[in-house]
Image: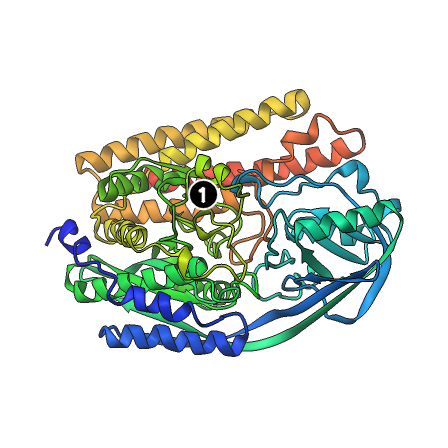
Amino acid sequence: MAQSDILAEVSLDVAWPLVEKFSTFPRWKPEDVNASAGMIVAALEAAGVPVTVHEAEVYLSVPFDARVKAGGRTIRAKPPAYAIDCRQGVSAPIVHVPATYSRSIGSLFAKNQDPALSDESRLRGKIVISEGFAFPQKIREFEEKGAIGVIAMNPGTDIHWGICTSIWGTPDLDDLPRKPKIPVVAVNNADGKALIAMAEAGETVTIETEMEEGWYVQKLPVVEIKGTVEPDKFVLLHGHYDSWDVGVGDNATGDATMVEIARVLWKNRGKLRRSVRIAWWPGHSTGRYAGSTWYADRFAIDLDENCVAQVNCDSPGCRWATLFKDVSWMPETEAYVQGVIKDVCGLDSHGERPHRAGDYSFNNIGISSFFMLSSTMPDDLRAAKGYYAVGGCGGNIAWHTENDTMEIADRDILLRDIKVYLGSILGVANAEVLPFDWRATTKEFGETLGRYAKAAGDTFDFSTAREALAALEASLGRFYGRVASGDVTPAAANAAIMGLARILVPINFTVAPRFRHDPATPVKPLPTLAVAEDIAEMALPGQGFAKVQLGRGANRFVAALRAAQRLVDAA
């Protein structure tokens, strides 16, 4: 049976009823999350798909309510997960630190506040109000400078839930110092403007938050569909099933997508070369990807030895999402994924570097990855509707609000997106040689090195790094040529392609050692070399320290590239 015949079996007969069921069932309280896992299991079992349910013990921060009391008013607010519980309230003068709103998802997670108005003498002992979402970089900087509370002023009439810690998953002892120690709330734009006026008048405000925090056991369903030729090797498809409120576009549609893919693949399991593993995560919203992090930790060695790719499924099938734009993919997967999208639905696609977000809990293991969000609405439509940048729901600003309800889902778009996901999974699972081109990655490395070297000027010598990159590029050219001519067996080629991921993904996306988890803050390309962008402007003695850091980063880079070269030369 051709891949197109398998795609033709996709329907919404199972998927759409699950979306409808989730549209009436809030899924952020731990007990409700576990109940909704039962709905996924029931849908799978009704379709004849066997499922294993793990019990993950994870640390969560569950937000309930919040308010700001100011000027005789009580202003509605929402606390982000990992803000501290402060029911007794904290009061202080309010100070405004202006910030810009992000124009695209590409800058959504970056710091955006005015550094000139963020000095410690101005913030210490104050409650800060600043434009934007309650994302961790901003909150941590304000806390470090002595703020005793933060109010995030959201862009529109709605208030968005979120999470304000940079800790990725359940904290370990080294992570705990980054756990927020202050109350944080979000308010809508109109109330934020009123609070800014109070700041300008030198008034005092009070923040109150209601939170619960602790260890919870959460259900984690996993389907394993064994391949017939290389059953130990697998593609991991995954997405979160907990949501803010009923979360239809984020992520009931994704959960339904994975259920339908499980149904179709189970029916066609005899046609799979490699296995496909499908996992539904809890703890995404209230634990900063606690479910996927638990799985990455618990099954790290299996993932290291056998996972050929990981594919995240978040917010497919949303209304008006007619484009595949700013799709997350690593460079080695780009040409492959673009080809799949073109083949399945005839659309061109545009991608971007994966953000440090979206259950990408496997970068430190070193796994080639694609997708996070999938389809989205066009920019001109978003502008016409007066929408601002958000992190899901196909660009609908219902993201992370109680308005993410049934009308956000679109049947036709969901059917198309399921086929795109399924086609991409099938292509990797059934390819004789894994369809990832590491020459695209080294090309990106060259562009990054060029940018860093230009910024650093004569403060650092990148010649050794350039030589190591040139040598690897030459080896990769020979390797792919030998693969094409049949001089390298598929088994040897696949071992090398997977091995390259274990070496090159970490140096491009992580700072922490393998099997640890970097903070949930933006990561620049080749992050241990990124200080090169700033070093030329630094004064002594800071420039000297930066040179030491850059030298260590260059050592890591060169050693990785030489290890990668030895790997492909030996294939």
Q: Is residue 462 visible?
A: no
State the residue in front, 386 or 487: 386
Coordinates of residue 230 in the picture (x, y in percent): 23, 59
Locate residue 302: give its quadrant.
bottom left
Residue 187: give x, y in percent of width and height: 68, 56
Q: Residue furthest front?
A: 72
Say left or right for 500 vs 33. left
Q: Quadrant of the N terminus?
A: bottom left
- Horizontal side of residue 200 vs 154, given as left or right: right
Percent of width and height locating residue 180: 71, 61
Tell me the amino acid under the disc marked 1: Leu
For label 1, the crowd category at 10 Å Cα-Cα, with few meaning under 14, some 14 to 19 and many 20 or more, is many
Q: Nearer the viewer, residue 24 or 243?
A: 24
Q: Which residue is mark 1?
A: 504
Q: Is residue 394 visible?
A: yes
Q: Nearer the viewer, residue 37 or 562?
A: 37
The residue lying at 39 percent from left, 44 percent from top is 500
